[in-house]
Image: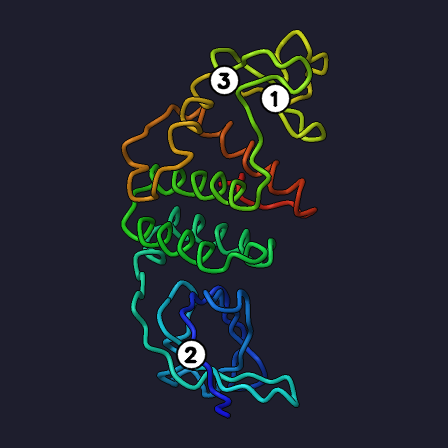
Amino acid sequence: MSRTAVYTALVLRNRLSGESNSEITLLTAEEGIIRATVFGGPKSKLRAYAMPYNSGRVWIYRDKAKDYRKLSDFDVHSWRPGLRELYERTMAAGAIIQTILSSHGGGGDWPTALKLAVETLDTLDGANEELSERLLVHFLWRWAHFLGIQPNLENCVSCGKDTSSSTILFNVHEGGALCAECANNSQLQKINPGCLRWLSAVGTSEPALVYRYSMDNKSLNEAKSLATAILSGTLGKRLEVCNW
């Protein structure tokens, strides 16, 4: 029986391991997140292929008895050099990778997780500064839906009132929106109608279409804070995506 398996994969992380090797973390459509050793120094072609954000088909040799994997070959389909050419793209891509790792690759539906990550990174690769941030928020919002934790913001969780046309306050502990009448805590996060409309509009859109949906800076910051709070509350780990 062959010990080599072929995966459709995205490189999430590449870290030094010893003096001349590295360990890569991959998101695969077949098994979710896996790790493998890459042999060779800085001039190794295979090590150069296995850089973060690259995706394609990888060949992994596995010794089950020793619970050991190594990268044997990598046919890179997408290099995405643009992610390293603009600060905002780099920060957004890093936040996407952090989110995927923090949620262990999404918890089971690996092909969908990989598709969402790859499509977002492909679009981000050529995005300008402002669109880069919108693509990150879009990814976080869709990832929350993918994990099954995206809240209903159209109705108050306390009284059921329609909140789609008014400013709401989001309660992380309640996991939903509160109307002004039910919210007595000024510390709750305010979400204005513009932010709600944008989240509703892009909720099922592909990343390549996000450029069509613009919004003001206030709404963008509210959407980013909201998506981050939802994911952080579920994952039990603060996602550092709001400070740039």
Secondary element at tag 2: strand
Mark in the foreground, 2 or 1? 2
Amino acid identity at mark 3: Asn
> Where in the figure is residue 4, as x and y percent of width and height?
47, 86
- The residue under label 3 is 192
Q: Residues within 10 Å of mark 2 (few under 14, many from 20)?
A: some
Q: Earlier in the sequence, mark 1 or mark 3?
A: 1
Q: Residues within 10 Å of mark 1 (few under 14, many from 20)?
A: many
- The residue under label 1 is 177
> Where in the figure is residue 9, as x and y percent of width and height?
42, 68
Amino acid identity at mark 2: Val
Q: Residues within 10 Å of mark 3 (few under 14, many from 20)?
A: some
Compared with residue 42, is residue 9 higher up or lower down, i.e. above or below? Answer: above
In the rendered structure, the answer to whether residue 172 lies left or right of residue 203 reads: right
| Residues at circles 2 and 3 in contact by the CB criterion of under 8 Å | no
Compared with residue 104, is residue 177 higher up or lower down, i.e. above or below? Answer: above
Mark in the foreground, 2 or 3? 2
> Where in the figure is residue 204, as x and y percent of width and height?
39, 37
Secondary element at tag 1: strand
Compared with residue 110, is residue 223 higher up or lower down, i.e. above or below? Answer: above
Task: Write the residue at 38% across / 77% down.
Answer: 48
Q: What's the distance in space between the residues labelled 2 and 3, CA to CA?
A: 47 Å
Task: Write the residue at 32% across / 28% down.
Answer: 214
Q: Earlier in the sequence, mark 2 or mark 3?
A: 2
Mark in the foreground, 1 or 3? 1
Task: Write the residue at 38% across / 33% down.
Answer: 202
Q: Report how many numbered discs are placed on residues in the image.
A: 3
Amino acid identity at mark 1: Ala
Secondary element at tag 3: loop
Q: Quadrant of residue 17?
A: bottom right
Q: What's the distance in space between the residues labelled 2 and 1, CA to CA?
A: 45 Å
- The residue under label 2 is 6
